[in-house]
Image (cartoon, rainbow, N blue to C red):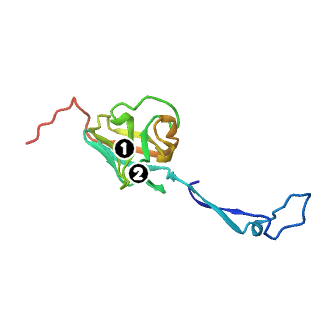
């Protein structure tokens, strides 16, 4: 579970229960009075629904995550955390990288993927995000909206 956790310590200077051999036995939460560290677990919320349009560059704002940073990334994939080919129609090997403002971008190229729903997987920047196996967190779906390309032609008057 993502969030911030405090690690506490029970040591020699603390009140302790009777010794068992040479070991100090810490008993109960009251024994752990000294804050030793803070552990931050980054993550992204599940069941998100994000949107892009066929024939346009895809930039996504509003990805809900804890402790976001530039370099966090999402990947369009059939399954999260597994090696696999890029999903056809998505630029940048199906990977969108977050900038310092939290906007995820697949780059300047237009999406050519057909309209539909696609699974999106998340990776924390600190994990590297260089391999499909690093995108382990299923955060929901990316809905691609728009008319089919390129076989349909429209004439507007």
Q: Is residue 13 above or below residue 86?
A: below
Residue 124 appears in the figure: no
The residue singled out by tag 2 in the image is: 70
N-terminal label among 2 and 1 = 2
The residue positioned 46% from the left and 34% from the top of the image is 78
Q: How many badges with numbers are in the image?
A: 2
Horizontally, residue 3 falls left or right of residue 139, namely: right
Q: Is residue 92 above or below residue 37?
A: above
Q: Secondary structure at mark 2?
A: loop
Q: Residue at x 91, y 59 (%)?
A: 20
Q: Residue at horizontal 69%, vertical 63%?
A: 8
- Locate residue 36, reporting x and y percent: 66, 62
Task: Indicate which disc residue 143 carries.
Answer: 1
* On-image quarter of the C terminus: top left
Residue ranking furthest to the left: 157
Q: Is residue 27 visible?
A: yes
Residue 30 occupies which quadrant of the picture?
bottom right
Mark 1 neighbour density, 10 Å: few (under 14) some (14–19) many (20 or more): some
Please state the horizontal and vertical placement of residue 134, each as a whole percent of the image.
Answer: 51, 39
Nearest the camera: 48 or 60? 60
Q: Which quarter of the figure has residue 55?
A: top left
- CB atoms at circles 2 and 1 under 8 Å apart? no
Q: Using the numbered discs, state the Cα–Cα distance from disc 2 to disc 1 in whole angstroms.
A: 23 Å
- From the top left corner, tell me how far across and down residue 68 is, in percent: 45, 55
Left or right, 61 with respect to 81, comes to left
Relative height, residue 62 to residue 78 (above, below): below
Residue 49 percent across, percent down from the top left: 41, 49
Q: Quadrant of the N terminus?
A: bottom right
């Amino acid at each position: 579970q993502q969030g911030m956790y405090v690690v506490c310590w029970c040591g020699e200077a603390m009140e302790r229960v009777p010794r068992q051999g040479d070991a100090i036995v810490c008993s109960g939460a009251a024994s752990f009075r000294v804050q030793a560290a803070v552990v931050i677990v980054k993550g992204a919320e599940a069941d998100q629904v994000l949107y892009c349009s066929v024939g346009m560059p895809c930039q996504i704002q509003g990805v809900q995550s804890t402790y976001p940073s530039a370099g966090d990334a999402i990947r369009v994939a059939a399954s999260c955390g597994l090696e696999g080919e890029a999903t056809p129609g998505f630029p940048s090997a199906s990977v969108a990288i977050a900038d310092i403002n939290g906007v995820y971008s697949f780059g300047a190229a237009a999406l050519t993927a057909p309209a539909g729903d696609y699974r999106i997987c998340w990776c924390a920047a600190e994990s590297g995000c260089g391999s499909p196996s690093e995108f382990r967190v299923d955060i929901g779906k990316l809905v691609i909206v728009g008319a089919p390309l390129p076989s349909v032609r429209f004439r507007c008057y």
